[in-house]
Amino acid sequence: MDFKTHLETNFTPIDAMRILESFKRKRTYGVLLNTNKMSVEDFHALFPELEKHPFVINGFLYDEEKLPLSELPFHDLGLYYLQDPSAMASVSFLNILSGENVLDLCAAPGGKTIQASLILKNSANIIANDLSFSRAQKLISNVERLGLDNVIIINNDFSKIKGYQKFDKIILDVPCSGSMMFRKNKEVQEDWSINKVLSLQKKQKELIQIAYKLLKDGGELLYTTCSFAIQENEEVILSLLQTTNAFLLPLEKSELLYESKHLNKAYYLLPHLFQGEGQFICKVKKPGLLSKNKQKPFQQINEHLKTLKKYELSERYNYWHANDLYSLPTFFINKNYNIMRQGLKCFTLKGKDLIPHHHLSRYLSAQQSTTLTYEQFKKYFRGEQLQTKVANGYYLLSYEGLNISFCKVQNGVVKNLLPKGLRVFKY
C-alpha cells in the first residue's frame, strides 16, 4: 500500500490531498519558554516577532530561518526548549493540576515532561521514563540544561515488575511510524511502510494497557502519536475500550482540531489546519473518584546545613545516594524504579569538599551569580580559564540573567567547571 492510499483509508480524499500538499510548504517551528527563568511577557518583549501558541500559554510559533533560536546563547543557557508546535499542544489538553502525581511513560527527549514540570513547579514531582538508556540520557541532558528540579528520570520496563505506584495523570506518547515527521525528516519518509505501522501497533497496544493499569481510579491518560495511521491511533484506543472500563473525554472544541471519522472523541492536529507537523490526541479516563495525594512531613538533613541554606535548599526533600546529594520539592519513595536522576543533583562529596553540580547551577536564581560580559562568556563557553582577584572558592557565573555554571577560583584563576560536552565555539 502506498502512502497516499494509506492516508485515504483514514481521511477523506480531500483531506488526504491537503495533508500531502502541506509537506511541500515551509515548516513552522515551536519554542516552549522555561517560565522558571523568565515571564511570558518579558520573553515576548525580547522576541516580539514570535506568534503566541493557540493552546500553550508559554509556547510560541516562529520562523527558524528569520530567528535562529537554536543558535542563540539563550538556548544553551536553558531559557527555552525547541519543540514542534503540534507536539507541544497535546499536554495542554491533559489539564495537569497542582499537586498531582504525573508519569510520562515514554518521555525522551523530554518536551512533554518539561511542560508538565513547569506546570507542577514545586507542588509535585513528575516521573519521566524511557526504556532506552541512551534516550534517557538525552532526557537528563535536557532537564539539566533547563534546571528543572522536580523530574525523576527512570529507565524501566513496566511490563516486567509489579508493585508500582499509581498516578493521577499519565502521558503516553508512544513510539510510532512517524508519518507526521515526513516534512521534517526525509529518512523517516523513506523508512515508512505499512508493515512497519502494523509491527508497531502490537507494542502500542501493550503500552496503553500498561499505562491504564498505572492510572488511579478517576485518573486520566493522554495518548498521542505523530502518525496519521488509524492502526496506530484509533485502533489502539479501541483495543483499550473493548478490554477495560475506560472511556474517552472530549477536548474543548476548536476549529484547529480535526475529529476522527472513525472514533468519537479522538482528534488530530493536521498540518493543513494547524501550523505544526501534526499529532493524534486522545484523552482516556478511568472511572472512579480520584483520591487526594498525601503530603509527607518534611525532614531536614543536618549535614552541610550551612551550604544547603546558602542555596535555599534546606527546606526541601534532600537525599544522599552514595556521595551525591539530590533534592526534590516533595516526598518520593522509590518503588522498584531504576533511577537515573532523582530530581535536582546538587553536590558531590569528595573527601571533605562539597562540589556543586552543574544541574544545581541551572536551577538557582541568577541573583546569586557573578555576571560575565559577552567576551568573557564566549571564552568561558569555549572552556577557557578566566582571571580574577576574588577569594578562593566556588562561584556561580551568569550571562544576560541566565546561569552558565559554577566555577572554582584558585589563586586568581577561574577554573572552568562547565561540562566538556556542553562547551561550544560558535559564539
Image (spheres, grey):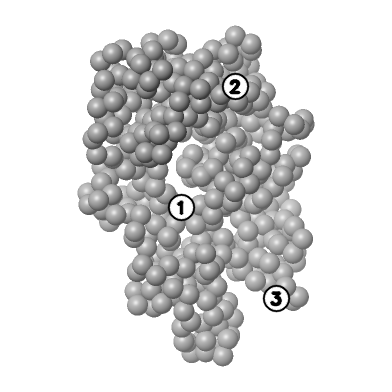
The part of the image, by quadrant, that contains residue 10 is top left
Q: Please rate how many residues cluster around mark 1, counting C-alpha atoms within 10 Å: few if below 14, some from 14 to 19, many from 20.
A: some
Amino acid residing under circle 1: Asn
Q: Which of marks 1 and 3 is in front?
A: 3
Q: Which of marks 2 and 1 is in front?
A: 2
In the image, residue 271 lies at what x, y percent?
30, 29
The quadrant in which the C terminus is found is: bottom left
SS assignment at label 1: loop
Does residue 176 sit above or below 403 in this rendering?
above
Tag of residue 353: 3
- Choose between 99 and 157: the one closer to the eye: 157
**Which badge, 3 or 2, is on the more N-terminal residue?**
2
- Choose between 215 and 328: the one closer to the eye: 215
Q: Please rate how many residues cluster around mark 2, counting C-alpha atoms within 10 Å: few if below 14, some from 14 to 19, many from 20.
A: few
In the image, residue 311 lies at what x, y percent?
58, 65
Q: Is residue 279 left or right of residue 419?
A: left
Between the residue at mark 2 and the residue at mark 1, the CA separation in whole angstroms equals: 39 Å
SS assignment at label 2: helix
**Which badge, 1 or 3, is on the more N-terminal residue?**
1
Disc 1 designates what residue? Answer: 36
Disc 2 designates what residue? Answer: 202
Amino acid residing under circle 3: Asp
Between the residue at mark 1 and the residue at mark 3, the CA separation in whole angstroms equals: 29 Å
Does residue 112 sit above or below 259 in this rendering?
below
Q: Residue at x 54, y 80 (%)?
A: 415
In the image, residue 102 lies at what x, y percent?
59, 35
Amino acid residing under circle 2: Lys
Q: Is residue 33 left or right of residue 23?
A: right
Q: Which residue is drawn at 60% across and 18% down?
A: 286
In the image, residue 384 lies at what x, y percent?
46, 79
Q: Nearer the viewer, mark 3 or mark 2?
A: 2
